[in-house]
Image: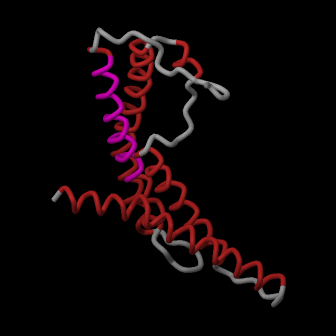
Amino acid sequence: MKKILLVIRDIIEIYIPVISFSIMFITFIVQIFSRRILQYPITGAYEITVITFTWTVILGACYTMRYRSHVAFTLVYETLSRKKAAIARLLGNLIIVGTFSILIIPSSEFVNFMSFQATSVYKVSLSIVFAPFVYFLCSVIGYTLSEIITDVKIIKDNNKNEPTLIVKRGNSK
């Protein structure tokens, strides 16, 4: 069961954004060719690029959370001891988990509510367009909870009180 869930997670966080980005890029190029060379703009190209861009960004953000590859402002953390930095991260992550948890139900209700509306050209249900946001909320909560667990372990460990990150610059020989 765990392997199946990991495969589903990879499909949602890797393959769907890659396919979505590819469709967006191809549509963009075709639209430019059609508009500039053929002098005939494609009506639904904008709709496709907006939907695929939305899916690419939202689901791609989930992937960056998985590997902690998102932008982080660590300037303050670098000056604190490991334990104090863990406390600061823990407080910030608790705010994120709390806020995103509060957003799950209203966001799910909004996605369900939008099922009666569709896009203007291809008649894609708006619930499909906005559905990745609910997954994004759950994904961020899950990945942030793992960071909270790590920070709690650091806080409980009384032996380590050194700075969190020592940056070595230049060649050290």
The picture places residue 63, in percent across and down from the top left corner, at: 44, 51
The picture places residue 103, in percent across and down from the top left corner, at: 39, 41
Quarter of image, res 76 = top right
* Residue 141 lies in the magenta-colored region: yes
Number of labels in the image equals 0
Residue reaching furthest to the front: 173
Colour scheme in the image? secondary structure
Residue drawn at point x = 32 percent, y = 41 percent: 142
25 relative to 151 in the view: left or right: right
Relative to 15, residue 120 above or below = below
111 relative to 55 in the view: left or right: left
128 relative to 77 in the view: left or right: left
Q: Nearer the viewer, residue 24 or 95?
A: 24
Q: Nearer the viewer, residue 115 or 87?
A: 87
Q: Nearer the viewer, residue 81 or 88?
A: 81
Bounds of the magenta segment:
135-154
* Residue 148 lies in the magenta-colored region: yes
Residue drawn at point x = 21 percent, y = 59 percent: 3
**In the rendered image, which quarter contains the C terminus?**
top right
Residue drawn at point x = 45 percent, y = 11 percent: 81
Relative to 27, residue 162 above or below = above
Q: Nearer the viewer, residue 132 or 112?
A: 132
Relative to 44, residue 77 above or below = above
The picture places residue 122, in percent across and down from the top left corner, at: 54, 80
Quarter of image, res 34 = bottom right
Q: Main secondary structure of the magenta part?
A: helix
The picture places residue 131, in percent across and down from the top left corner, at: 41, 60
**In the rendered image, which quarter contains the N terminus?**
bottom left
Residue reaching furthest to the bottom: 38
Residue drawn at point x = 41 percent, y = 27 percent: 95
